[in-house]
């Protein structure tokens, strides 16, 4: 009888140990309070973005959840208000797949919100095919939409300096490449979704690097990061026939959203990291991304081409 009780207890202990060792990661140690500050988090209705918004709301910030679904965005805002007792949490509509939506969002935000202290570029998709005009949707949502959003909000960030931009990238940038001949066009090949995702995450890091350089001396700093491998809806592309394997594997080895949000929260709140503007973080500390993510010539060209693609330059 004792052995029968011992077995599940051992299994539970082993699970807790494995989960803590493999799925944990560093915790953000900042105790910064954010009363009087305004944070904007894209894709804040689920996963890492929701956990980030919840933490910033707990610190007293006014938090704008920029989400594509009004139903999911409003539900998240309601539950964060309830969980934190912070009534300054609100939803605003933003679909990064549409540049018109990004422009409309920025116009509403600038009209309604006098401050912007923290801009967390978190929303992302891992697969998505192409837009009706043939554009690669993953590149559009993960890079171009955020690029335009940042440009449109930059003056407000400067006005509220010291302020920060936090770009949720990924270690997947290691397999990314920037091909200016085909930038924004659908990726071809068997691994097209994976490749498009990696390319967009490389673009995120190059964008943060170039942005930091352009913002030097303004008091606005910028950080890119890898959140770890996190158990979220990002993996909803995994085919149903793989779920019996994938679901237990992800429960055991992946981080939960709260752990996955720690590096975003660190980059948004940790005092004294301003000198590290432009750097790439993982596990709440600066790390070196792959050399191709440190190429300033490519970063500058990506910026200029992106400006043309979103209609900000001739
Ligand atoms: N999970 C990981 O292991 C992992 C690893 C490395 C990096 N990341 C990065 O972490 C970020 C957050 O991902 P997650 O893991 O938390 O995934 P998630 O739970 O799927 O959250 C993604 C968020 O982005 C939103 N979104 C998607 N398309 C959008 C659009 N067109 N306009 C506005 N919002 C849109 C989603 O809204 P809906 O709910 O409406 O779809 C959702 O709120 C992403 O940038 C991802 O690349 C994740």
Image (spheres, rainbow, N blue to C red):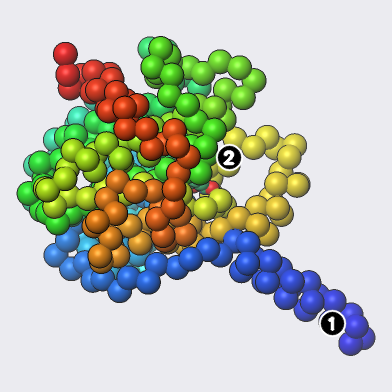
Upstream in the sequence, badge 1 or badge 2?
Answer: 1
Residue 97 position, x and y percent, is 36, 28
What is the CA distance from the residue labelled 1 to the residue labelled 2? 36 Å
In the image, is the residue at mark 2 within 8 Å of ligand 1 by its beta carbon? yes
**Helix, strand or loop for disc 1:** helix
Structural crowding at the residue carrying mark 2, measured as other residues with C-alpha within 10 Å and reported as few (<14), some (14–19) or many (≥20): few
The image's mark for residue 236 is 2
Q: Toward the viewer: 305 or 234?
A: 305
Identified at 16% across, 35% down, the residue is 152
Identified at 40% across, 55% down, the residue is 286
Q: Can residue 113 be seen in this view?
A: no
Give the residue number, with chain letter if any, for mark 1.
5
Please say if 240 is above or below 128. below
The quadrant the N terminus occupies is: bottom right
Identified at 38% across, 17% down, the residue is 180
Structural crowding at the residue carrying mark 1, measured as other residues with C-alpha within 10 Å and reported as few (<14), some (14–19) or many (≥20): few
Quick check: 181 left or right of 196? left
Quadrant of residue 271 within the rendered picture: bottom left
Judged from the image, the quadrant occupied by ligand 1 is top left
């Amino acid at each position: 009888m004792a052995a029968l009780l011992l077995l599940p207890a051992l299994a539970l202990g082993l699970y807790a140990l494995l989960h803590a060792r493999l799925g944990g990661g560093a915790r953000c140690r900042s105790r910064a309070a954010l009363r009087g500050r305004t944070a904007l988090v894209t894709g804040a209705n689920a996963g890492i973005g929701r956990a980030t918004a919840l933490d910033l709301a707990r610190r007293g910030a006014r938090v704008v959840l920029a989400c594509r679904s009004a139903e999911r965005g409003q539900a998240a805002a309601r539950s964060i208000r309830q969980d934190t007792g912070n009534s300054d949490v609100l939803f605003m509509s933003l679909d990064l797949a549409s540049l018109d939506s990004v422009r409309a969002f920025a116009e509403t935000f600038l009209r309604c919100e006098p401050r912007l202290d923290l801009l967390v570029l978190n929303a992302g998709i891992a697969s998505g095919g192409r837009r009706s005009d043939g554009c690669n949707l993953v590149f559009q949502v993960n890079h171009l939409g955020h690029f335009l959003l940042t440009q449109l909000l930059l003056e407000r960030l400067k006005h509220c300096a010291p302020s920060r931009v936090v770009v949720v990238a990924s270690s997947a940038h290691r397999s990314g490449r920037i091909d200016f001949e085909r930038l924004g066009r659908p990726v071809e090949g068997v691994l097209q979704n994976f490749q498009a995702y990696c390319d967009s995450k490389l673009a995120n890091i190059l964008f943060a690097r170039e942005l930091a350089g352009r913002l030097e001396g303004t008091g606005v700093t910028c950080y890119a990061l890898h959140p770890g491998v996190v158990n979220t809806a990002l993996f909803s592309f995994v085919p149903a026939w793989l779920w019996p394997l994938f679901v237990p594997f992800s429960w055991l080895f992946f981080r939960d959203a709260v752990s996955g949000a720690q590096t975003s929260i660190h980059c948004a709140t940790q005092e004294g990291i301003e000198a590290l503007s432009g750097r790439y973080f993982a596990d709440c500390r600066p790390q070196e991304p792959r050399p191709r993510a440190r190429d300033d010539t490519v970063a500058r060209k990506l910026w200029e081409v992106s400006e043309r693609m979103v209609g900000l330059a001739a």
